[in-house]
Amino acid sequence: MIIFPAIDIKDGKCVRLLKGDYNNVTHYKKSPLEQADEFFHLGFKNIHVIDLDGALEGKLVNKSIIEKIIKKNNFKIQVGGGIRSLENIKNWIDVGVDKVIIGTAAIKNQEFLKMACDKYKKKIALSLDVRNGFIALSGWKKQTDILALDFIKKIAQTKISRIIYTDINRDGTKTGPNIEGTIDFSKVINVPTVISGGIASIKDILNIKEKKSPNIEGVVVGKAIYDGNIDLRKLSKII
């Protein structure tokens, strides 16, 4: 199972949101580059980086910061936030991104998602940000009436390489992930799925591993790292 330490960037800084609320932001002392360095030196090979400004504004905002992370450390990095075009995707792939995460653009335009997956094969990951079963868009600001399960059934033939399933109600809360809900979701479509939202401890991660669910590829870990609830050295040993 892959562990993805998370770096969320807003106004050029490392932050965490509570339940996706841009008005409820916690700022952290380390810069995104400093935080990435720490992850790399402790042995993490994969990271999850989100441009929160980009997600909100619908364009790439913190690209230069993320490029510095890519150039300095040899990560397999998945990047999301504000990616709305094939050109955006190409730009990220050209600088060395392993997986380009698309969310809002994919939900609004399924043909765009198909084109991206056909053109860039194994480089495209789909972000499904879910609140009470329904998909949210544009940095989680816009709630839709689209059920995540209904949407995934519609795109079952699209060759997505990974799904990042975020339970918004758990995100940033450290109340534990929605393990069973995400596993049930992952059974609907045979795509590697990453659990995101609510991780509070190493025990949560071990609980996910113990399930041995074939479609669960990994887990995103954010606030519990930044707040010191999870020791990075101990976490690195269960990669």
Image (tube, grey):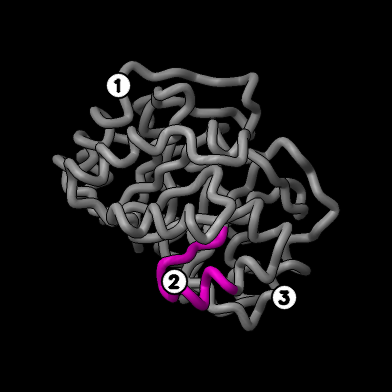
Tag 1: amino acid = Lys
Marks 1 and 3 sit apart, C-alpha to C-alpha, by: 41 Å
Question: Is residue 117 shown in magenta?
Answer: yes
Label 1: few (<14), some or many (≥20) within 10 Å?
some
Q: What residue is disc 2 on?
A: 120
Residue 213 shows in this picture: no
Instruction: Determine which residue is flagged by label 1.
Output: 30
Q: Nearer the viewer, residue 61 or 30?
A: 61
Q: CA distance from mark 2 to mark 1?
A: 33 Å
Q: Residue at x 61, y 34 (%)?
A: 57
For badge 2, the amino acid type reads Tyr
Q: CA distance from mark 3 to mark 2?
A: 22 Å
Amino acid type of the residue that numbered disc 3 sits on in the rendered structure: Lys
Classify residue 179 by image quadrant.
Answer: bottom right
Q: Residue furthest bottom?
A: 157
Question: Residue at the spot x=73%, y=57% of the render?
Answer: 108
Residue depth check, mark 2 versus mark 1: number of the one nearer the observer = 2
Q: Position of residue 214 (x, y in %)?
A: 46, 76
Looking at the picture, tell me which residue is in the foreground, 226 or 164. Answer: 164
| Image marks 1 and 3: residues in contact by CB distance under 8 Å | no
Magenta region: 115-126
Q: Which residue is mark 3?
A: 153
